[in-house]
Image (tube, grey):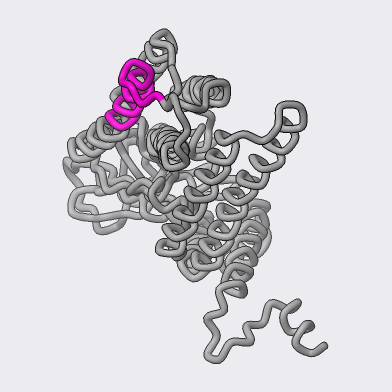
């Protein structure tokens, strides 16, 4: 009973701590505490009374408080990763063996009228062999999510192109294992000719080429600073259909839908003619090629370099119009300041404005449900006292480490 109560309280019972499940629970509590603290400060509560008389000082205190809380949340992320990986490992293996069980039930139901045949046995044996191989491979990578490990990109997100290619690869291996078992059983009329398998071979080459090309395009654009990539804290299933910001991406959605549709047609044709390679029509191969072309074109067009359009003095209501002086707030207008995937609190704390020789961190200004500053198009930052009067260059360094163009401003005494 005492052990159960301790676990319900989230206490780690392992010697020296380090229980992955408790770390996962601690990460969730840290996230909830940060959100509550952000919304509390957004309403003006929780600010020390000694700072309430100074808007600049209170804003800086709030920003520092949120930045420290965001770093605490980020520090819990790696500790909670083993628990997530173990959970994903179990779920994926359950899905694999569940698919084998579903195939067995489907074979049994469809055999009621026609009887059990050698292709049914071969299909079931091939599925069991493939599931056993996937289980062994998953154990080797259980610390990185098991079967999902090969599908992770360099940014720790699930890759759409890799997932599609993996599905076609698994189907091809299943077909080959099934035909191998039929040949071993001496089943006549097993067709391994190129005429039937040309479509499947073309699709395999097309999806594999898509993986290599998309990775090359992204790498080159990141190296050229035309695409900003921020590492995700953990992979999510939505990565297959969404961009780095979690919004549905039309190019990814159409590629997954078309690939899944063609894959289902291929599986149905295999079930109707299980003694040979699936005869995939060339019209479907062409349809998939068009989908791949749209997907890669979107990869080439996405993103862009962050850019400053202008820098002006930030004016509060009731202020007089005046030039920029030391201590004033400056408003930087442009685009790409908060790249996709960098809207989380911890990446926002890495946003820096370089004003001459001084590096100023952009203050976090909370509002209920988010932040009013910084945003992707506007940054507001106080001009540090160390900035000397005169002509000064201003640039922004984003969370992805990319620096914008430089804009010159005049700072007066």
Q: Which residue is drawn at 41% across and 17% down?
A: 288
- Residue 222 point in image, percent of width and height: 24, 39
Which is more toward the observer, 298 or 1?
A: 1
| Magenta-drawn segment | 191-209
- Return the residue found at the far top: 283
Q: Residue at x 19, y 41 (%)?
A: 393
Work out whether 131 lies above or below 20: above
Which is more toward the observer, 165 or 299?
A: 165
Which is more toward the observer, 248 or 115?
A: 115
- Residue 268 point in image, percent of width and height: 57, 22
Q: Along the horizontal axis of the image, is 13 left or right of 250?
A: right
- Residue 368 point in image, percent of width and height: 65, 46
Work out whether 206 lies above or below 155: above
Task: Check if residue 201 falls in the magenta segment.
Answer: yes
- Residue 235 point in image, percent of width and height: 48, 50
How many marks the image carries: the answer is: 0
Magenta span dominant secondary structure: helix
Work out whether 322 lies above or below 156: above
Quarter of the figure that contains the N terminus: bottom right
Which is more toward the observer, 196 or 53?
A: 196
């Amino acid at each position: 009973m005492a052990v159960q109560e301790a676990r319900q309280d989230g206490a780690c019972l392992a010697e020296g701590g380090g229980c992955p499940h408790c770390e996962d629970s601690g990460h969730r509590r840290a996230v909830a505490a940060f959100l509550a603290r952000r919304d509390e400060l957004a309403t003006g509560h929780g600010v020390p009374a000694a700072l309430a008389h100074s808007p600049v000082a209170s804003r800086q205190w709030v920003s520092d408080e949120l930045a420290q809380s965001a770093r605490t949340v980020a520090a819990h992320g790696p500790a909670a990763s083993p628990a997530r990986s173990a959970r994903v490992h179990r779920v994926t293996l359950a899905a694999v063996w569940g698919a084998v069980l579903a195939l067995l039930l489907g074979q049994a139901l469809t055999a009621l009228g026609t009887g059990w045949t050698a292709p049914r046995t071969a299909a079931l044996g091939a599925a069991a062999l493939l599931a056993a191989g996937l289980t062994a491979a998953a154990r080797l990578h259980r610390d990185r999510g098991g079967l999902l490990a090969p599908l992770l990109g360099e940014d720790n997100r699930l890759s759409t192109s890799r997932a599609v290619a993996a599905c076609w690869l698994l189907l091809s291996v299943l077909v080959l294992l099934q035909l191998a078992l039929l040949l071993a059983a001496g089943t006549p009329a097993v067709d391994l000719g190129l005429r039937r398998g040309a479509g499947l071979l073309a699709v395999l080459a097309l999806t594999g080429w898509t993986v290599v090309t998309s990775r090359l395009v992204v790498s080159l654009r990141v190296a050229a600073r035309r695409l900003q990539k921020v590492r995700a804290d953990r992979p999510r299933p939505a990565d297959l259909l969404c961009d780095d910001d979690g919004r549905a991406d039309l190019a990814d959605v159409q590629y997954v839908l078309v690939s899944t549709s063609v894959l289902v047609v291929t599986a149905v044709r295999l079930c109707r003619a299980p003694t040979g390679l699936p005869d995939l029509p060339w019209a479907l191969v062409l349809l998939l090629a068009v989908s791949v072309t749209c997907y890669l074109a979107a990869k080439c067009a996405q993103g862009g370099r962050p850019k400053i359009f202008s820098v002006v003095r930030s004016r509060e209501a009731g202020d007089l119009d005046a030039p920029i002086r030391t201590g004033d707030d400056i408003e930087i207008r442009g685009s790409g300041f908060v790249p996709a995937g960098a809207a989380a609190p911890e990446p926002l704390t890495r946003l820096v404005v370089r004003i001459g020789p001084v590096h100023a961190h952009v203050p976090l200004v909370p509002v209920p449900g988010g932040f009013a500053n910084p945003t992707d198009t506007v940054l507001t930052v106080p001009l540090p006292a160390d900035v000397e009067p005169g002509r000064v260059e201003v640039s922004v360094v984003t969370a992805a480490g990319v620096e914008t163009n430089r804009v010159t401003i005049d700072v007066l005494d």
